[in-house]
Amino acid sequence: MTTQPATLAEIQRAMAAAVMQPLTADDAMQTVAAEGRPMREVAESFIAPNSRLTAFERLEIYNRQYWYRVLDSLAEDFVALRRILGSRAFHRLSVAYLSSHPSRSFTLRNLGVRLADWLLANPQCAGRRHALAVDVARIEWAFVEAFDNADYPPLTVEQIATLDAASRLALQPHVQLLALHYAADDLALNLHKQEKRQTSEAGVQQEEVELPKARLPKLRRRPTWVAAHRADNSVFYLRLRREEFLTLSAIRQGLSLVDALETGFVGSRIPVTRRAAFVQEWFARWAELGWICAPPLESLYPDSPTH
Amino acid sequence: MSGNRFNAYSTHGIGIGLRIPHYAHIFSRKPVVDWFEIISENFMVDGGRPLAVLDQILERYRVVQHGVSMYFGSVTAPDPEHLRRLKTLVRRTGTPWLTDHLCWGSVDGTYTHDLLPLPYTWEAVERTAERVRMVQDFLEIPIAVENVSSYAAFTASEMTEWEFLTEVVERADCGILLDVNNIYVSSVNHEFDPMEYVNAVPAHRVAQIHIAGHSRYEKYILDTHDHPVIDPVWQLYARAIDRCGPTPTLLEWDDHIPSFDEVHNEAKKAARYLQAHAAQAAEVTQ
């Protein structure tokens, strides 16, 4: 029996399922729908043909547009990841990721929000460069967040000087903290620069060029801590000491100053006698960069009624 | 320009879409442009360069917001976060009216990021009009819905596209962003007379007009916004101006974007139709 979507909701669910089903290798619509029915039958159940196009062909236009749009958007945000994996592997990875995590946001800006975590759980998509690929995906997503996240009035050096052990602080939302397996921040930046040069010199759009895997400099695994942040509307990456990274992470989690610092120095090789100097240096830098701000009121009084 | 209540009685003339490749030209040369249309979603962020650029533009130019993801025809309710961000932006830009598409694009919280056509059914009329009303009430500014280009028609449809558009805007009591290029594209893809569409639109509700170019393929036309406006589309525009009177007009150019001057000059071709209409109106008065 042929199922015919009758209500608006049924039509929209049927069309969305067809449109979001991956294309074939030749960029055509698949002939079998996800539920096993012939796609021709699915299309004919709600799309009318005309004198030039069958229902299948008309639906296929939307199927292609969907994939071209989301794949382009992801490629734009993960330029370095694409270079590390090569464009074919990146394409396969993107289709698999977007099939698992179709967009749940009104804006394409958020399309890659889960890519790094998904890649971590799907090592087969990155092959031998898996750990590096996860690092690079995190670095590139951090760029997206740092680029346009909020920037609240920062605490001044004078205000920071008045803090006590119980004070709770917050980090600017544009500050993104990254714990990496490799010192991959420089690599990602270099790949972005190369990509820009190639695109402009070739004078063609990125999607029209098939890129092989980039030849990479020899990289050794080395735990690396990085902050991506925004200054003067540009995004920068800054290397951090492990202790500084842990302290900032604890501040972001809402720990009091004393607890954040204690967390920061867990397992640290920095002698106790020198720690105060480090903390002073960090706070001076954070104040200069405007990274520290007041926490939102609701985080300080979570049990208070909201209006 | 004569205005109506769907464009806040605006005096906006001919505008162009604000696009990143033109930023440097706009900020260095400060060209005279009557108004810019911005894509709302590009600025619904919390900070950084997008908002800094927008604030610079707002210092010098009038801006009207155009959205691509409200999906008035989607059956699932809009994301409250989306509405909240949109309202924040509306307050920032002071847009006198706001436009988005008469289409759907999300279902059960999953987004296709496409402007998908609606089946022209009475159920779709009711649901879409209800959503337009709700968004209009929430944003507290006039909304105009844009007819989309489409490549597929539905077996369930019970009326023509222009009948559907009319029913929705009457029930929602909202304006129309009449895209004459989209009418042309759809007329080829669905084999109808585009002039019949323009003649049927409730003219008093037209708040704004879009013009654009498109790409022709062997069996259909795609609305690519990457070419100059073709003559048949100018003819539809002329007829729309005849019926609606001088109306805020915007040229869309989104891909293979040429220089600022080329885009602006293409948009300014609309002036000849607006002037012809004004001359005609003057003759009638005499």
Image: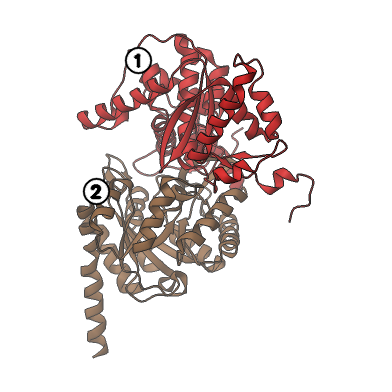
Q: Which residue is the site of mark 1?
A: A213
Residue B23: image location, x then y, percent: 30, 50
Instruction: Give the letter of the red chain.
Output: A
Q: Which residue is the site of mark 2?
A: B227
Q: Secondary structure at mark 2?
A: loop
Q: Compared to A206, does A54 lie above or below?
A: below
Circle 2: is it few (<14), some (14-19), or many (20+) Cα within 10 Å? many
Name the residue located 52 percent from the left edge and 24 percent from the top edge.
Answer: A116
Answer with left or right where residue A16 lies relative to residue A166: left
Examine the rendering and report whether any part of residue A95 can be seen.
no
Q: Compared to A100, does A57 lie above or below?
A: below
Name the residue located 27 percent from the left edge and 49 percent from the top edge.
Answer: B24
Colour that chain B carries in the picture: brown
Answer with left or right where residue A64 lies relative to residue A3: left
Q: Quadrant of residue A270?
A: top right
Q: Quadrant of residue A5?
A: top right
Q: Compared to A307, does A270 lie above or below?
A: above
* Three-letter residue code for mark 2: His
Quadrant that contains the C terminus of chain B = bottom left
Question: How far apart are the two marked residues, 2 and 1, measured between alpha carbons?
Answer: 35 Å
Circle 1: is it few (<14), some (14-19), or many (20+) Cα within 10 Å? some
Residue A250: image location, x then y, percent: 65, 30
Examine the rendering and report whether any part of residue A108 can be seen.
yes
Answer with left or right where residue A130 lies relative to residue B192: right
